[in-house]
């Protein structure tokens, strides 16, 4: 059953089912010549993903922005990102998928605030590896893929898989940090507060867009919340909320399922006019203009 799901075209439903059956962690080797190659339809999943290009070039859209990945490029996808893999005639890649539940049960506290700041100025969430770096990351990923296919009743296999995953994850963070002068990141109460804030926003941004709501949930003042979030992410609390709302608005507008009034209602705006003014302020164009220029099915 697990292998059948992994071999299916990557729809959101199949993806989540496969992750669930594999305890929140899975790996897949993809070839564009495979009849079960990834769907060209855009989809969104609630897990993290790592993609390493092993051959050729991949054209894809991340949150409706076009990107190109070349051989030896590695991409990190965050939860709730919308991505669409275009028709690529000659490309191969390895993907590793893991969800928040896996990280939590394994005692890994993936720092949302640090990740947000690390990648916020890098819209592709990717970097290129040298030949040497590519070789050991490639074999790290192959080793994890192989261990994930070992029978689950093998003694100590969960610990073996987990250690293999950790080695890959932390190696990648080391490589990422080598590519720029890192700003010391304090793992203190400010970091923890920001992580709690980001988690609350991701769960509640549709119905609550006010900083004061999140400040009350965290039992601090709105001013203090914004100051702390700004120090950790280089964005104020309000800017973070607005970014999440706009990302969701773009997804809903791009689909053929909802009209603009329905999108406004889904995002809990009082009316479509208010939503339109908010959207234009954030993006520079109206919802109608965005919808016309980004009309794809989801």
Image (spheres, rainbow, N blue to C red):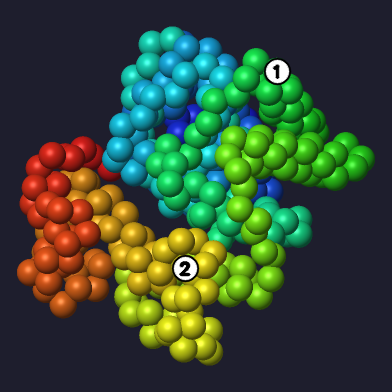
Identify the residue at image location x=66%, y=75%: 189
Residue 120, x across and y down, in percent: 45, 50
Relative height, residue 139 to residue 254 (above, below): above
Q: Of callouts 1 and 2, which one flags the residue occurring earlier in the amino acid sequence?
A: 1
Identify the residue at image location x=19%, y=69%: 265
- 74 relative to 269 in the view: left or right: right
**Which residue, given by chain and number where applicable, does mark 2 sit on?**
230
Mark 1 crowdedness (10 Å alpha carbons): few <14, some 14-19, many ≥20: few
Identify the residue at image location x=65%, y=36%: 178
Residue 261, x across and y down, in percent: 11, 64
Choose top left, top right, bottom left or bottom right for residue 95: top right
Choose top left, top right, bottom left or bottom right for residue 235: bottom left
As helix, strand or loop, the secondary structure at mark 1 comes to: helix
Tell me the quarter of the image containing the C terminus: top left
Q: Is residue 249 visible?
A: yes
**Which residue, given by chain and number where applicable, does mark 1 sit on?**
132
Badge nearest the viewer, 1 or 2: 2
User: Which of the numbered marks, if any, corresponds to residue 56?
Assistant: none
As helix, strand or loop, the secondary structure at mark 2 comes to: helix
Mark 2 crowdedness (10 Å alpha carbons): few <14, some 14-19, many ≥20: some
Q: How many marks?
A: 2
Relative height, residue 110 to residue 132 (above, below): below
Q: Is residue 17 visible?
A: no
Q: Nearer the viewer, residue 118 or 183?
A: 183
- 215 relative to 29 in the view: left or right: left
Residue 278, x across and y down, in percent: 17, 66
Residue 270, x across and y down, in percent: 16, 77
Tell me the quarter of the image containing the N terminus: top right
Identify the residue at image location x=60%, y=24%: 129
Q: Nearer the viewer, residue 64 or 97?
A: 64
Tell whether label 2 touches label 1 (CB within 8 Å). Answer: no
Relative height, residue 53 to residue 253 (above, below): above
């Amino acid at each position: 059953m697990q292998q059948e799901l992994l071999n299916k075209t990557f729809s959101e439903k199949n993806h989540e089912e496969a992750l669930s059956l594999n305890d929140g962690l899975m790996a897949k080797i993809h070839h564009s010549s495979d009849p079960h190659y990834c769907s060209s339809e855009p989809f969104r999943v609630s897990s993290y993903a790592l993609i390493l290009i092993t051959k050729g070039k991949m054209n894809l859209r991340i949150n409706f922005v076009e990107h190109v990945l070349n051989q030896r490029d590695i991409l990190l996808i965050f939860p709730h990102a919308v991505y669409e893999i275009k028709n690529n005639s000659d490309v191969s890649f390895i993907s590793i998928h893991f969800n928040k539940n896996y990280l939590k049960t394994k005692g890994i506290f993936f720092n949302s605030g640090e990740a947000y700041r690390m990648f916020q100025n890098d819209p592709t969430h990717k970097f290129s590896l040298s030949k040497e770096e590519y070789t050991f990351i490639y074999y790290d990923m192959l080793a994890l893929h192989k261990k994930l296919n070992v029978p689950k009743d093998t003694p100590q296999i969960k610990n073996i898989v987990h250690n293999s995953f950790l080695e890959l994850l932390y190696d990648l963070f080391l490589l990422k940090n080598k590519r720029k002068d890192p700003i010391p990141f304090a793992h203190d109460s400010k970091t923890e507060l920001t992580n709690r804030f980001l988690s609350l926003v991701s769960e509640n941004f549709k119905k609550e867009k006010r900083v004061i709501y999140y400040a009350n949930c965290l039992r601090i003042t709105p001013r203090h919340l914004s100051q702390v979030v700004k120090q950790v992410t280089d964005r104020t609390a309000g800017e973070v909320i607005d970014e999440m709302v706009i990302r969701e608005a773009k997804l809903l507008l791009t689909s053929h399922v909802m009209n603009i009034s329905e999108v406004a209602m889904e995002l809990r705006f009082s009316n479509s006019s208010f939503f339109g003014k908010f959207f234009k302020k954030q993006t520079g164009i109206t919802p109608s203009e965005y919808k016309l220029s980004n009309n794809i099915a989801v």
